[in-house]
Amino acid sequence: MKAPTYFSPAELVKRWGGRVSEKTLANWRSMKRGPLPSKLGGRVVYNLVDVEAYEQLQREFPKAAR
């Protein structure tokens, strides 16, 4: 079984090419939006599986279509 891959908020910002900021991710967490965050050792991380699921939803339901 492959170990899960996790992204820090900074790594997720980099993955998304800076289209969102770490502050935006923090706001999304407080509003329960965006990819599902987790805590590991007191640090916020995002599991690759959750990030990919969120990205897929964004492709299927773009904001203009909502």
Image (cartoon, grey):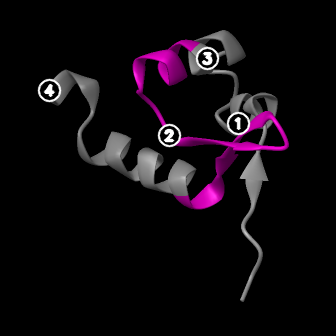
**Sequence order check: which comes first, mark 3 or mark 2?**
3
Can residue 20 be seen here? The reply is no
Disc 1 from disc 2: Cα separation? 10 Å
Point 75% across, 61% down: residue: 5
Disc 4 from disc 2: Cα separation? 18 Å
Q: Which mark is residue 37?
A: none
Q: Secondary structure at mark 3?
A: helix
Point 85% across, 43% down: residue: 41
Q: From the image, which quarter does the N terminus lie in?
A: bottom right
Mark 1 or 2: the one toward you: 2
Q: Which mark is residue 12?
A: 1
Mark 4 or 2: the one toward you: 2
Q: Is residue 15 above or below residue 27?
A: below
Outermost residue toward the left in this view: 66
Residue stretch rendered in magenta on the structure: 27-49
Q: Which mark is residue 66?
A: 4
Which residue type carries mark 1?
Leu
